[in-house]
Amino acid sequence: MEFNDNLEKLRKISEKLIERDAHFEQILRYSKISIFTKDPFGRYTYVNQECADTMQVPREEIIGKTDKELWPADIAEALIKIDSKIIINKKPTATVEELPAFGRLRKFLCYKFPLIGINGSVIGGISIRLPEDWSA
């Protein structure tokens, strides 16, 4: 009897986790903010559709690639420098980044943060395009 009770509890927990993950995935999918994660080597492990649309690259072509493979050299180096500081310091940072989007350079407010997991630190980030007339 106890075994069956524990099995039922595990089933209910599993269902709740699956539902929570599905809801979270929908939030990421439908958000109008670019959201991404990178592994410790700088490879993109997740990008939401808004991020892919902004980069004008299909999601499946971004996953597994690094900034050096996706951006011009000067932009990639600047992004890598920021990411390295986040991994070393284990602290979030907010920056204004100029990135190519929709055929020209545009400014983005980007908030990046460490995500500490069982496989080490990774980078999480959210980014929103700033209005054309925005200035710091």
Image (cartoon, rainbow, N blue to C red):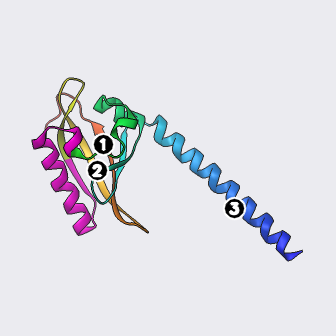
Q: Residue 121, image x and y in percent?
A: 34, 65
Labels 2, 3: front one: 3
Of the residues shown, which amino acid type is indicated by label 1? Ser
Region of the chain picked out in magenta, as a range: 68-95
Q: Is residue 86 above or below residue 45?
A: below
Tell which of 23 and 117 is nearer to you. Answer: 117
Q: Is residue 61 above or below residue 66?
A: above
Q: Pick out the residue farthest to the bottom.
A: 2
Mark nearer the N terminus (2 vs 3): 3
Q: Residue 74, image x and y in percent?
A: 9, 43
Mark nearer the N terminus (2 vs 1): 2
Image quarter (top left, top right, bottom left or bottom right) of the N terminus: bottom right
Which secondary structure, mark 2? strand
Q: Which residue is mark 2?
A: 111
Q: At x 28% / y 67%, what residue is drawn?
A: 90
Mark 3 neighbour class, 10 Å CA radius: few under 14, some 14 to 19, many 20 or more:
few
What is the CA distance from the residue labelled 3 to the residue labelled 1?
33 Å
